[in-house]
Image (cartoon, rainbow, N blue to C red):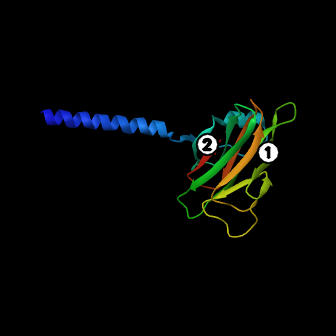
Amino acid sequence: MRLMTRRIYIFFITMLILTASAAVTGEAAVRVLKDQEYTTSAEAASKAAKTVKRGSHRIRLSSSGSGCGFLKFTADESRKYTFSFSKLSTKYPYNCGHVYLMSEAGTDGKTLKKTIVRTQGGKAESIYIATQKDAAGDKLTKHLKSRYAKVTLKKGQAIYIYFSFARGDSLRMTID
């Protein structure tokens, strides 16, 4: 009886340690994109977008819908932010797509415009990513397995992250 009690005690302590370590390592939050076709309407994007904060996020792309959608990030301080995209996974042999970072244009804030970002190879408004590296093309237009985009934001400024993929399961996005 004593041996059985000890084993149960060890089991519960082990489970407690494993649960605590998973919380400390900061498992990426899963964000499922709501299907939304490309739009320059800030109102439509805002309704469809889920809000994200700095950190690592697993983005699940819709398999039943368009594979397109918005996320919204609001800068918590004025500085340069780095958005990293990687680990695009799919059940198909190849998948590719692109990401736009969009900000409010003009004084009315009703429209969105693509933001020019610094990425591999220079400045661009489209961030191309794929499950495999393309063989040809320059670094701005070819699909790479991982990408980053650097953009300067003011405190309180919102940026909409638009994903457009033909098909796929998920990808990782980190905001630092």
Residue found at x 56% / y 64%:
93
Q: Position of residue 112 (x, y in %)?
A: 80, 39
Say if mark 1 contacts mark 2, CB within 8 Å.
no
Which is nearer the N-term, disc 1 or disc 2?
2
Residue 175 figure quarter: top right
Disc 2 element? loop
Disc 1 element? loop
Q: Position of residue 149 (x, y in %)?
A: 72, 49
Quadrant in which the C terminus is drawn:
top right
Residue found at x 62% / y 46%:
173
Which residue is under mark 2?
33
Residue found at x 73% / y 46%:
150
Residue that lies at the very extreme toward the bottom in this rendered image = 135
Amino acid tagged 2: Leu
**CA distance for labels 1 and 2:** 21 Å
Decide which of 111, 4 is in the foreground and name it: 4
79 horizontally vs 169: left or right:
right
Residue 56 figure quarter: top right
